Image (tube, grey):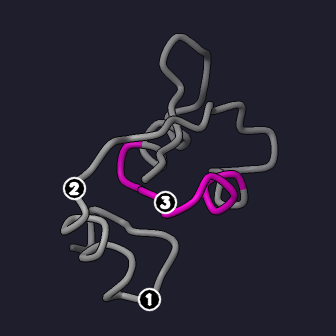
């Protein structure tokens, strides 16, 4: 699982909220779903259990999981 991170970088409040709530199945999905065109967030891998990964991405048939709606 991947997420976007602005830790140690400058970024807008919108990008920080976007990064805090979204998780991605692949690094490519994370790169394609940035907050806006000039977003300089890093893509960070997050270790998760197989059950959590299946629950977030496989069962929902999605590459993006919004934690606000779960």
Q: Earlier in the sequence, mark 3 or mark 2?
A: 3
Left or right of 65 on screen, residue 28 = right
Horizontal arrangement in the rendering, residue 61 relative to residue 15 (left or right): left
Q: Calculate the distance from the C-alpha at mark 1 to the C-alpha at mark 3.
A: 12 Å
Seen in the picture, residue 58 relative to 56 is either above or below; the reply is below
Q: Nearer the viewer, residue 11 or 67?
A: 67
* Element class at badge 2: loop
Residue assigned mark 3:
24
Q: Which residues are magenta?
A: 20-31
Give the Cα separation between the discs numbered 1 and 2.
Answer: 18 Å
Query: Dot 2 surroundings within 10 Å: few (below 14), some, or many (20 or more)?
Result: few
Q: Is residue 48 left or right of residue 7?
A: left
* Residue 63 on the magenta span: no
Closer to the N terminus: mark 1 or mark 3? Answer: 3
Disc 1, disc 3: CB below 8 Å? no
Residue at point 53%, 41% (across, down): 4
- Residue 3 lies, with reference to residue 16, above or below; the image says below
Instruction: Give percent across and percent down for residue 2.
Output: 48, 48
| Residue at (24% x, 76% y) in the render | 55
Q: Nearer the viewer, mark 1 or mark 2?
A: 2
Q: Which residue does the numbered mark 1 point to in the structure image?
A: 61
């Amino acid at each position: 699982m991947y997420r976007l991170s602005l830790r140690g970088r400058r970024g807008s409040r919108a990008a920080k909220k976007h990064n805090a709530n979204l998780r991605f199945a692949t690094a490519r999905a994370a790169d394609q779903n940035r907050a806006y065109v000039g977003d300089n967030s890093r893509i960070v891998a997050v270790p998760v259990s197989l059950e959590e990964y299946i629950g977030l991405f496989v069962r929902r048939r999605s590459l993006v999981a919004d934690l606000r709606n779960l």
